[in-house]
Amino acid sequence: MAERLPNETEQAPHGRVFLILQRVCLGAAGVGGAVIFAASITVAASVIMRNLGLGGIRGDFELVELACAACASLFLPLCQFNKGHVMVDLFTLWLSPLTQRRMDGVWTLLFAFGWAFLAWRLSVGLGEMHEYGDRTMLLRAPVWWVYLPALFGTALSAVVAFLQSLPMLSHAFRAMEVR
Amino acid sequence: MEPLTIAIIMVIVLLILIFARMPIALAMGMVGAVGYMVLASPYALMAYFNTAWVDKFMSYELAIVPLFILMGHLATRSGISASIFAASNAWIGHLRGGLAMASVAGCAMFGSISGSSLATASTMARVALPEMRKNGYSGALASGSLAAGGTLGILIPPSVVLIIYALLTEQNIVKLFLAATIPGILAVIGFFIAIAIYVRLFPNEGPTHAPADMKTRFKALRDIWHVVAIFVVVLGGIYGGFFTPAEGASVGVVLMLVAGLFTGGLTPKTILDCLIDTAGSTAMIFAIVYGADIFNVALALSRMPSDVAAFFSAADVAPIVVLLGIIAFYLVMGCLMDSLSMILLTVPVFFPTIMALDFGLMPEQQAMWFGIISLVVVEMGLITPPVGMNLFVISSMAKDIPTSQIFRGTTPFIIAEFFRIAILVSFPVLSYWLVDIVAN
Amino acid sequence: AEVTLRVHHFLPGVAPMQTRFFDVWAQEISEASGGAIEMQMFPSMQLGGKPPQLADQARQGICDIAWTLPVYTPDRFPVAETMAMPFMVTNAEKTSVAMHTLMEEFGQNEYKGMKPLAFHTHDGGKIHTRGQIVSSAEDIKGLKLRAPNQATGEMLALMGAETVFFPVTEMVVGLSNGVIDGCCLPYEVVPAFKLQELTKVTNEPEAGGRGIYANTFALVMNERKYEGLSDDLRAVIDAHSGADLSRRLGAQFDEFEAFGKSVVEKQGNEIHTIAASEIDTWREMAAPIYDTWIGKLNDAGHDGAAIVARANALLDAG
Ligand code: NA
Ligand code: NA
């Protein structure tokens, strides 16, 4: 069911684009992981302080919510890069590997358009939130901050998906194989 | 075109796209977006996407998903999971299907500190899947028992689904948690029986080995003292009034980190690996959550779920027929929809319907009984193909196990769940007896 | 039906707000329009998004009518939020009428792109505890209390409480296992969370004086949808909105409050009255909060002092 290429062997050697994208995706995921990790440490500290009678950390719940939104966005590109979005392969196993690969290429290209559309709308949303000046209730953190990682994550996913889809769609693009 | 027709077309197109290898998140998102555009307007769709991503994920309930997944990765990388399996293997590994049972028991243990099925499935899969495979278990049995075991995350309290049900129906959350305990234990027993029968039918899929001697067994137990300590602190903290279950997720992550550093299993390099591993599984789940969101909103706009619910309410038949009809509806929808959205869309209509019927129970008992039944059938949706979140979680972690194997491995557990639903429907007392004893 | 209006809100479909207000109101409008206007109800945020987005959803046409809380988007609707400061509320009906007047006088530009149908509040919050009786500010010192909104949280913190801002789901578990000692909420929500079973004592301010806090609500409609209605149908909406609807919603919340109180009484919980004179001393302690608020209104281009003074005058006039 996982997205898996039966003919992974026809992969070309890793090019420069591949290496750069991989670094950026890994970096984003690492930052996202660090954010959610930091949030959990903050909550644990808040729990300990509250039980010691020192008072909890104000806005710890909000911090976790902000961290969740940030990490959801920052995790995306790596998942796209690793072809981690699940699908059901059960009903297409009878097709030839090449046909399957072409189908996956079409869906990956659609995925690229989907992420690009989302990135475009999020940029509008970012503008709106910036204009309204909405802030979270306790931490008074501007809500538009959270839109920055969202915009970054969806836009990068669009780029990754687009570059991945081309060699899957046609041999002409084989040279630029991204994983 | 009638909204109901649009809803039916959406469901059919979604199925076709899923069967045609389209990634689930993309299929649900695209069909949902087109449906939304037709049912509302292109302008509304644009406006919806301006904020929907951030709205959805700035959420405390969803934040526990990466936290529990991170906890699982820390446990794996620090070698703690290996010691859990050494212990369960030493004690019950020699039984037929013993390791699969140990995995289910582990899921139940984890489920009693976590309120989410996805987190339980992914954590325990991370821990148990490699061990079962190493011990010669078939991909079908290993993945099936973990997908099913993962549902114990919401079946055994605390449970996100029960919290939502309680809020929708004005029930006491703590009593509902209590009510879910016996049905949760029944699930564990049912899964054990399913495994026992399965390995007798297919002995090659779950090999046994000679029992370990007592010395090995106790040494294995000593090696998991940190797991026991974490478990005691988290459970004791929740039930002793030191923190809430959601805070428990964060506490668990920190304790797991401390234990890993203490045993020397974790280094800065492995911690970084944990963070990156967490990214992969979380993004896959969150992308589907997001796609399901727009799909569910479009279905809500078509009013299909509430129309179907209203149809059952208006039908002039025996109470038990209405209940069975609702269960059947949940089971069918569970193949396609996300569990939480299903509860949100249908309970407001089904609940008053059920409460108006006479099953010979007190209102509070009836409410708890229906809550438990809804929870169980909705939770089954997590392991029924084609859209079953637990199946996806397992599949993304076991890339060498073909889909057909995972479906095959889950079947005995689905059968066990059918038996459990029959038992819970036939004996409502199982769903409120503990509450009557403890609370009243 | 000629026109279908989608109504979106965050409460569950079984809540009295849905069954006793929205369903009845929709029926009245349907009848008054001879069946030309049909209202489709979407409770529990079924159309997606979170409660803070409801106003935007109405403005953008994601729904046609939304029931929303200005406090969820701090500083976006400062005039509408004014009545949500601590120690403003008298009872729901009077405060709702006062809020409607205040919005007509000062808040005309706040709901751009939306047609406000009504403004209202719930009745004042009470302090529900696991056993602690609150007679004076001294009793609040060291209590772990869940605050309902930011300003009330600040006020409780000023009085020495250890405030936490749990989401309601966490609050319910926290009350049952003792992570927190109590919460500050009106009686109206007691049945929804079964608070009567989680707490033993309810401390309520003496009737007739000011209450501890109340959240404010706005019922708003998409402006284009409203302008696009035929004259007849717009007249139907007009006849079922405005000051009368604000008063009606307030009165309805006073009824919900009375029902919630009866549930607490039936449970046999202790109901303890906090003297009005005591509340007056608390209100003096809250002076810095009012000053901050006036500054905030000034920053938004209003005459903050005038708005707060007018709000108090309207409330005192009853
Ligand atoms: Na659980
Ligand atoms: Na399913």
Image (cartoon, helix red, strand yellow):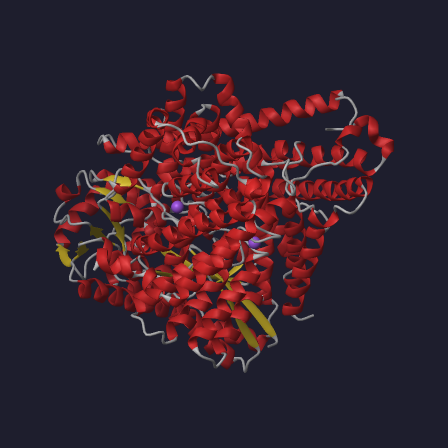
Question: What residue is rendered at 17% in x and 39% in y?
Answer: C141
Where ligand 2 lies, by quadrant?
bottom right
From what the image shows, is residue C206 above or below residue C256?
Answer: above
| Residue situated furthest right in the rendering | A172
Question: What residue is rendered at 70% in x and 42% in y?
Answer: A111
In the displayed structure image, the side of residue A160 where residue C99 appears, left or right: left
Residue B74, position as x, y percentages in the image: 46, 27
Query: From the image, which quarter does the C terminus of chain C lie in?
Result: bottom left
Question: What residue is rendered at 13% in x and 46% in y?
Answer: C136
Q: Nearer the viewer, residue C268 or B391?
A: B391
In the displayed structure image, the side of residue B110 where residue B433 appears, left or right: left
Query: From the image, which quarter does the N terminus of chain C lie in?
Result: bottom right
From what the image shows, is residue B40 above or below residue C304?
Answer: below
Q: Nearer the viewer, residue A157 or B37?
A: A157
From what the image shows, is residue B125 above or below residue C79?
Answer: above
In the displayed structure image, the side of residue B367 where residue C126 appears, left or right: left
Residue B39, position as x, y percentages in the image: 64, 63
Residue B259, by quadrant, is top left
- Count the numbered circles shown: 0
Residue C132, position as x, y percentages in the image: 15, 48
Residue B312, position as x, y percentages in the image: 50, 74
